Image (cartoon, grey):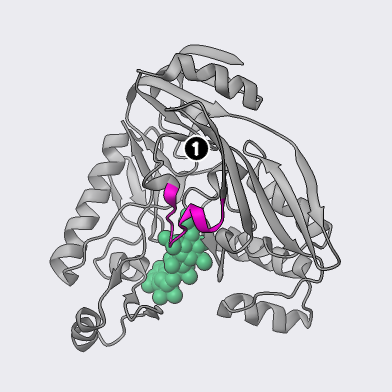
């Protein structure tokens, strides 16, 4: 277990915000996680994964706990499926690369998402027609409040769009240590997302290796690399509205794009709303809206959390005034 005092979080968040925390504790095993509980109980604390979905306030007067548990093992298999268990600290995309390399299908559409394995169930990461919930069979960890070990089934995780029990009932209480995924030994490609389907048609192939390559291409062309430009991926969630609200919008804005949801509601791309408020590629102070994907806010260099929030609030207010829709942050603001 490594403990650091008065530590800069700049290298611990993909936004590159120069925040300072009172203390940072890094744990390499479940035992270390359990013994760290004495330090964090009664204090303000935050459990950090890869730091790719957070916006830290400039000062975090509490403890950052980073479970950095590594290891990948096969726990079960039959002719069709293989269950692979990974430590929460494993880098997400290296793990996806490992599974695709072995031709175990299920995670290839989630290639190149920044972050760790342990963070993947928390917001049920999703991209290009896939969500991680469709492969997870169990999430293990330790509760801060009781110190007890937990193992939750897929159903018990209450997964939803960018949501899970780890963002509601167990928010701040569950330290995820391992995630087990059920992968397909005879993979079928998921090309439900049109740009992936088009790219695969040109290549005349249907391997998961090719899907991974194409998704890496699409992401590299569309999304800023956090190693170069500070950002936290999608800053907002795509809003969901009732069909009557949507029909009214459609009358006023016939070109508005949408996805029909199974519950009758309609999901609208926040990127379109933001672009049509004139924010695409625009800056406000040291924060900016990405010029290709306006759902992503970027750090123009030395931005503070306040700079990012000022921009976010200006966008929220413009979208609300123009379309009557309230955008919600996807990124966690930690203060
Ligand atoms: N659009 C515009 N203007 C733009 C860009 C996009 O109007 O400049 C509209 C278009 O109508 C486009 C639509 O937005 O069809 C959707 O865009 P895109 O397919 O790029 O995806 P998204 O809905 O903006 C979601 C996820 C991303 C994920 C992509 C791809 C959320 C909040 N975001 O974005 O996830 O990579 O789909 O599947 O659901 C992340 O969570 O960090 C993330 C990047």
- Quarter of the N terminus within the rendering: top right
Q: Which residue is drawn at 49% across and 37% down?
A: 51
Residue 131 shows in the view: yes
335 sits left or right of 299 in the view: left
Quarter of the figure with residue 20: top left
Q: Which of 146 and 68 is in front in this view?
A: 146
Report whether the residue tagged 1 is closer than 8 Å to ligand 1. no
Q: Quadrant of ligand 1?
A: bottom left
Instruction: Tell me, yes or no, whether the highlighted magenta stretch contains residue 315.
Output: no
In the picture, residue 112 is in which quadrant? bottom right
Q: Is residue 120 above or below residue 63?
A: below
Whole-percent x and y of residue 113?
Answer: 58, 53
Q: Which residue is drawn at 40% across and 47% down?
A: 167
In the rendered image, is residue 124 in sight? no
User: Does residue 129 lie above or below 258 as drawn?
Assistant: above
Q: Give the range drawn in magenta.
A: 153-165
- Residue corresponding to mark 1: 51
Residue at (60% x, 58% y) in the render? 220
Image quarter where the C terminus lies is top left
Q: Is the magenta stretch mostly helix, strand or loop?
A: loop
Element at badge 1?
loop
Would you say residue 162 sits in the magenta stretch?
yes
């Amino acid at each position: 277990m490594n403990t650091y005092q008065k530590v800069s979080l700049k290298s611990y968040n993909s936004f590159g915000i120069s925040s300072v925390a009172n203390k940072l504790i890094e744990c390499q095993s479940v035992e270390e996680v359990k013994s760290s509980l004495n330090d964090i109980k009664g204090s303000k604390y935050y459990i950090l994964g890869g730091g790719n979905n957070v916006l830290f306030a400039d000062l975090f007067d509490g403890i950052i706990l980073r479970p950095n548990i590594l290891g990948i093992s096969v726990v079960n298999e039959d002719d069709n499926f293989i269950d692979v268990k990974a430590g929460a600290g494993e880098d997400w995309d290296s793990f996806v690369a490992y599974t695709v390399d072995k031709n175990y299908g299920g995670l290839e559409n989630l290639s190149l998402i920044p972050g760790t394995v342990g963070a993947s169930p928390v917001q049920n990461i999703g991209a290009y027609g896939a969500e991680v919930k469709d492969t997870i069979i169990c999430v293990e960890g330790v509760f801060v409040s009781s110190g007890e070990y937990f193992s939750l089934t897929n159903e018990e995780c209450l997964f939803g769009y960018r949501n899970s029990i780890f963002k509601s009932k167990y928010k701040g209480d569950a330290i995820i240590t391992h995630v087990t995924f059920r992968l397909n030994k005879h993979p079928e490609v998921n090309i439900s997302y049109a740009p992936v389907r088009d790219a695969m048609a040109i290549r005349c192939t249907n391997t998961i290796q090719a899907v991974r390559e194409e998704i890496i291409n699409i992401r590299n062309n569309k999304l800023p690399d956090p190693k170069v430009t500070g950002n936290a991926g999608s800053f907002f969630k795509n809003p969901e509205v009732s069909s009557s609200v949507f029909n009214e919008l459609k009358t006023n804005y016939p070109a508005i794009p949408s996805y029909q949801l199974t519950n009758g509601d309609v999901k609208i791309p926040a990127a379109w709303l933001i672009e049509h408020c004139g924010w695409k590629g625009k800056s406000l102070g040291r924060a900016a809206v990405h010029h290709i994907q306006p759902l992503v806010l970027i750090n123009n260099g030395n931005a503070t959390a306040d700079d990012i929030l000022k921009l976010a609030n200006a966008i929220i207010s413009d979208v609300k005034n123009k379309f009557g829709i309230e955008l919600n942050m996807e990124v966690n603001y930690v203060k």
